[in-house]
Amino acid sequence: MNLKETDIKDFLRRYSVAMILLIMVISLSLFSWRFLRPANLINISLQTSIVAIVAIGMTFTILTGGIDLSVGSVMALCGALASGCIVRNGFPIYTAILLALIIGVGIGFLNGLLIVKGNIPPFVATLAVMAISRGLTLVYTQGRPISGMGDDFVYWGSGKIGVLPVPVIILFIIFLISYIILRHTRFGLHIYAIGGNEETARLAGINNDKSKIFVYMISSFTAALAGILLTARLWSAQPNAGVGLELEAIAATVLGGTSLMGGYGGTGGTVVGAFIMGVLANGLNLLEITADYQRVIKGIIFILAVMFDIYTKKEKKKG
Amino acid sequence: MKKSEKINGYGERFGLIIAFFIMIITISFLSDRFLTLPNILNILRQSSINGIIAVGMTMVILTAGIDLSVGSILGLTAVITADLLHSGIPVFLAILLGLLLGFCIGFVNGLLITKFKIPPFIATLGMMTLARGLAFTYTQGKPITGLNESFRVIGTGMIGSIPLPVIIAALVFFLGYLFLKRSRHGENIYALGNNETAAEFSGIPVKRYISLVYALSGFLSALAGMILIGRLDSAQPIIGQGYEFDAIAAVVVGGTSFTGGHGSVWGTLIGVLIIAVINNGLNLLDVSSFYEQVVKGVVIAIALLLHRLAQKKN
């Protein structure tokens, strides 16, 4: 297998996901004239950006063959901490944001330690941390939303630069950074190597433990960031923010073609996957399909996407 | 080899039981209401629903799988059973159909996993969303209330002074034990959990067993759902949400290994009771319910770390 061949296959796979998105966009614009209006498109990208940011971090953990179920709770906790520090303790907003991000990264470090040093499967370790973080959020907020953070804070979720909402621009920056890390750094190479075969990676002299801890720190960082953006968009920190968001982030990652076994995929596909889900939700709304049916449809599409992913992988093996 | 494994298993469970008793003694010192008969029966009744689900979850995890859809299956079968009861068919038939539906949904999980090679985590995650959506679509988001009195016995009835749900749960645990430890099927399930390829080569119908395990998990979720709506006298489309978490927690605390092939329903029973006692203790001590999840998460993490430690020593 030479490099060119893998490049083409890689391109084809990502192309197929992008094709699905394109087909969806075309068919939806035929069904509803409102779909292609700029206001609606900007709305979709704003709604998608937060899931996409979380999903980029999730992609890092899944690439190593792991998973991070704690992202939704970390979002809520960090959003609440940032707002609480501003409203209750009168911190300057950037100090508060920085503090929340640091705590987010700290939780990721804890995830990583449990997985690497405690030798606990990622699924259960992050499940426990998910419960702990959600509980801490409830304790911190006393179950009530926190609001009144001021315009400077709200700008990060609701403001615009030109026509583009700030979260969309942040998504773009996060994506660029993730792309560079994964494709152009030694650390990125290590992530793929660990996901491909952990034992081989170890024998090749890669410090698996360190890389894996880093990966969970990245995931928690993007979750914390998304939590702050969500809080800023909603003008308030909700104690139940981000419930179930880990599932959406995993779905976006898998839809984007990253293998749950690790070692294959990338954040570009993940962003496309997040947009597929965003466009789908928006389209179902425009077609006036109720939220109940939307769940059913999302569940079916999720399963179909994974089947498609597994099917194409089989083809690749045969080829 | 096998003997030392067995001893190791006893050692682990012994440690768990000691931890459980220390908890009980501590809480009974802190609250004089804890060790009263009504409270103990209350704990048992509250844990019966999680217990029934956790038995199915134990079997699934023994095959190195996971079932995230239990809460949604519970919700969907509950609203459909309630609706069947309203339609006036015999209670017995409604229960049977509800249980059958749970079994079938679980079986679909099994098919997705064995035939289409979808990882259990993802397949049951999809089913979780799907079944919950169907429950909401079916009821249009409204609860179904006012259930048949003779049906409600399943959740509210008593035999002597023991609540019927507790007896059902005890029966489920006992049957689960017989199935896993006293039958050929159980042996095969442990074998395939230990090493799927080896089990396949030795002629065990691996795929059939995996499908069966998920079907049983769905069946037990449906059973738990009936007890729940019998007690509440109302079937809401949202019920059972998050129950997968408690069931997984009980199994994990009870020492069943996530990599499959190691663990038992007795461990799970202790896990279920530990979680129920924690909840009850926090309530009695007037700790804000906000702390509940923090405590649960910490307990799971500690239990996992202790198991790893015990394994490393051996």
Image (cartoon, grey):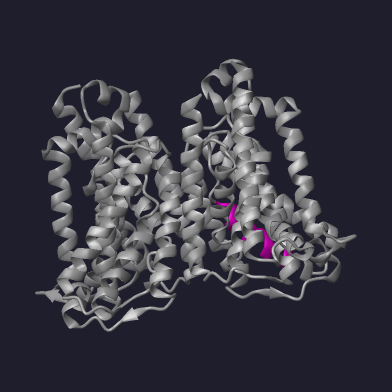
User: Quick one: quadrant of the C terminus of chain A?
Assistant: top left
* Near-viewer residue (A195 or B208): A195
Q: Return the residue found at the far front.
A: B29
Q: Position of residue B169 (x, y in %)?
A: 75, 51
Q: Return the residue found at the far right.
A: B160
* Near-viewer residue (B4 or B31): B31
The residue drawn where x is 73% and y is 60% is B35
Asked if A92 appears above or below A181 in the picture, the reply is below
Q: Position of residue A252 (x, y in %)?
A: 33, 52
The residue drawn where x is 35% and y is 47% is A111
* Near-viewer residue (A127 or A170): A127
The image quarter containing residue B59 is: top right
The residue drawn where x is 22% and y is 73% is A157
Horizontal side of residue A152 vs B189, given as left or right: left
User: The magenta stretch spans which residues?
Assistant: B69-82
Q: Position of residue A268 (x, y in %)?
A: 21, 48
Q: Position of residue B159 (x, y in %)?
A: 88, 59
